[in-house]
Image (cartoon, rainbow, N blue to C red):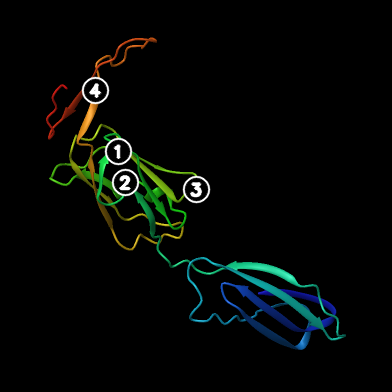
């Protein structure tokens, strides 16, 4: 809807369209309009994207005396019907030797609705059974990166399943498919004998290796 005003009367309005798609439109006014709104119909091709891409309109009016207006620029956006997708996940699916105090990181293709980034939609649990682990979930300032941190240390030499579902973008489009990945924690750890004590220069340290599946002996 364009508001027109001209002493001689506007006889034609031309619209050039660029951005998400390229097109043009023309509206001829009979009789000429000196002060009136004008509805201009834009034909949107079936192939136009539906992911909130911008549409730039350049609008020019001509009056009965042959004068041409300065182009008026106006930006619209296509409707967003495209669900978010997952760009990357860390730890990667099948990763081994993962730290027992990991930060799981998921990067999405577009900004997310913060209300959908909740622990219920990003679940971490052992693959051999058991309840989901308590965890903190945070949406970074870019609105595309989600970090998940377990509240407790993961078990040694154990495989975990990480599932992501029902996360939505700003338009409310839900993740199309549930992502499920698996990773395994370290098989051994080093335990400092002086845990929590301040070390001084020249002090001799002894480390103990512990594992649930490996045997160690002094050499």
In primary-sequence order, the first of circles 2 and 1 is: 2
Q: CA distance from mark 2 to mark 1?
A: 16 Å
Residue 36 location, x and y as percent?
Answer: 74, 77
Q: Please say if the residues under marks 2 and 3 sit with CB atoms less than 8 Å apart.
A: no
The residue pinned by badge 1 equals 135
- Relative placement, left or right, of 19 versus 119 is right
Q: Nearer the viewer, residue 179 or 118?
A: 179
Q: Earlier in the sequence, mark 4 or mark 1?
A: 1
Disc 3 target residue: 142
Q: Residues within 10 Å of mark 1 (few under 14, many from 20)?
A: some
Q: CA distance from mark 3 to mark 1?
A: 21 Å
Residue 207, quarter of the rendered image: top left
Pointer 3 and pointer 4: residues touching (CB < 8 Å)? no
**Furthest residue to the front?**
219
**Front tag of 3 and 4:** 4
At x 40% / y 62%, what residue is drawn? 173
């Amino acid at each position: 809807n364009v508001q027109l005003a001209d002493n001689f009367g506007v006889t034609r309005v031309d619209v050039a369209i660029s951005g998400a798609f390229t097109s043009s439109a023309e509206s001829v006014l009979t009789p000429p309009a000196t002060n009136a709104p004008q509805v201009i119909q834009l034909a949107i091709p079936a192939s136009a994207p539906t992911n909130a891409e911008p549409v730039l309109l350049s609008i020019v009016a001509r009056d009965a005396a042959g004068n041409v207006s300065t182009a008026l620029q106006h930006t619209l956006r296509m409707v967003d019907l495209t669900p978010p997708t997952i760009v990357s996940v860390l730890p990667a699916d099948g990763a081994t030797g993962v730290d027992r105090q990991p930060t799981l990181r998921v990067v999405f293709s577009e900004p997310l609705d913060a209300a959908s980034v909740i622990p219920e939609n990003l679940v971490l649990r052992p693959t051999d059974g058991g309840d989901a682990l308590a965890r903190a979930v945070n949406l970074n300032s870019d609105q595309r990166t989600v970090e998940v941190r377990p509240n407790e240390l993961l078990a040694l030499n154990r495989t975990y399943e990480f599932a992501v579902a029902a996360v939505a973008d700003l338009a409310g489009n839900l993740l199309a498919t549930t992502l499920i990945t698996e990773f395994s924690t370290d098989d051994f750890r080093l335990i400092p004998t002086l845990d929590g004590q301040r070390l001084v220069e020249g002090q001799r340290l002894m480390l103990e290796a512990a594992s649930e599946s490996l045997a160690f002996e002094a050499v």
